[in-house]
Amino acid sequence: MIAELQHVLSTLDLPADWVGLRAVKETASCRNVRDGLPQGNCKQLSYGTMVEVLVNGQIGYGAVNSFQPEHLRLAAKAAYRQALAASQWAIYPMTPVTRPKVVGNYTSPFLKPLEAIAPGEINELLIRLCQTLKVSDKIVQTNASANTQEVESWYISSNGSEVYQKFLLLGTSYGAIAQDGPDVQQRSNNGNGHYYQGGWELFPDAALWDRARQIGEQAVELLTAEECPTATTTLVLAPDQMMLQIHESVGHPLELDRILGDERNYAGGSFVKPSDFGTLAYGSALMNITFNPTVPGEFASYGFDDTGAPATKEYLIKDGVLRRGLGGLESQARTGVAGVSCARASSWNRPPIDRMANLNLEAGSDSVAEIIRDTEHGVYMEANRSWSIDDQRYKFQFGCEYARLIENGQLTKSLRNPNYRGTTPEFWRSLVRIGDDNSWEMYGTPYCGKGEPNQSIRVGHGSPVCAFANMEVFGGGA
């Protein structure tokens, strides 16, 4: 494909400053089972090419669902006309520096290819999951699903870039709903959070059946659990809830295009200002957040972003102080703020914009046992159930599926309908304990939405167990 794209590029007769072509082919499958009965089995294919053209400091875009040379040339001409027409209203003049020359490749690590397991075998696993979740007659619904995606991309440019990347993506989810009269409770393996790069070696794992049984038992347990109390206390969050906390209160507010106002019409802005970088105490000194698309197997790993910037690990927040933004080369040029290789597109028919990829909270030195032991009173929460955060990413309120009370250094009774609220700076500055490597877990989701037209893209988040002092928690009736 690289050779074919180069041929098209060599035949373009456009007075442009720079031209790039990015071809993408995506194959996806989905299998869904509810109450032991298959609900959906599908396979999808999508492919096409995005052409970018830089003229007079303005980039224009032309996309076509084809790899045919004549179609790509038409897309290039459309992109040229668009860039030329828009250049008189350009916000910031771009140069080919924002599309550097890069040569390389990347392939997801895997042991068992995605085509290695037949659809019938996958359905049998999902049916068995539903049966395992059904631990009681009070379980009124079970569900299980498995989704795969294989993505190949080829990227070339007029200044010599040649990049090939191949992603193997696997996501699984399962859960149960319990009911006793008017009382309904749900429990899951964190819904759509179990997405990773790799093959079928990731599913099923050795702990799957025990974990599924526990999920069913906890759904029933919550029917008779006490309501989460209303209190200001120590909040201990499991990694599967920290995933969303990092995503909403660190990832989105640090996106440079939001800070610039580009996203304000659709998804809001940010409380962070360009002058905050290098000075703002975002959290306590225990807070170290990295942007790291190089983690093997994490859902949003890659070798290069969609503008050709090589993937590197960078600290966004170091010892609690804000250092870098989530902005690609274009946003970095506009703001003068250091960013990362995060200009990403969700598919062939979308241009790259600032997106988080793998955004991780680095582990500390405390074991989970030590964190619980040293907590006189608090609430431990797992698995997100609901979320709300304002359009400046400042005030938030999150609900979880499952909680336990902490009394005198011990996890005691279970609690239902646990929620907590706060503001982003207050929350992260209240970080008082952070778990060690043994408590660090990574998750991923393909459903981060942003941009007009919308782009739903994959992200990854890793975190240890964390404790936050003096947080407001409350139950579902509050």
Image: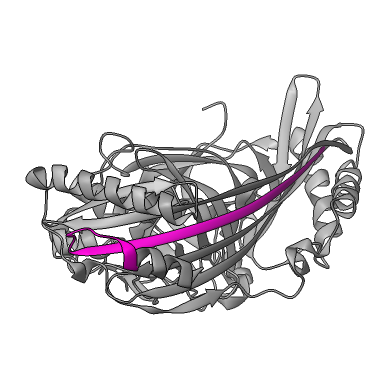
Magenta region includes residue 16: yes
Residue displayed at 57% across by 77% down: 437
Tell me where residue 52 sits by quadrant: bottom left
Q: Where does the image place residue 48, in percent across and percent down from the top left? A: 49, 51
Above or below for 320 versus 379: below
Above or below for 42 versus 380: above
Magenta region includes residue 133: no
Q: Which residues are magenta?
A: 10-33
- Identify the main secondary structure in magenta: strand
- The answer, for residue 283, to whether it is visible in the render is no
Q: Where does the image place residue 318, in percent across and percent down from the top left? A: 32, 73
Q: Does residue 226 appear left or right of residue 437 in this picture?
A: right
Q: Does residue 295 appear left or right of residue 258 in this picture?
A: right
Tell me where residue 167 sits by quadrant: bottom right
Residue at the far top in the pictured view: 182
Residue displayed at 19% across by 60% down: 16
- The answer, for residue 418, to whether it is visible in the render is yes
Pick the residue in front: 38 or 99: 99
Residue displayed at 32% across by 44% down: 393
Tell me where residue 209 sits by quadrant: bottom right
Pick the residue in front: 382 or 41: 41
Pick the residue in front: 338 or 109: 109
Residue at the far left in the pictured view: 88
Label total for image: 0
Q: Where does the image place residue 144, in percent across and percent down from the top left? A: 78, 44
Residue displayed at 72% across by 67% down: 199
Q: Where does the image place residue 464, in percent across and percent down from the top left? A: 54, 67
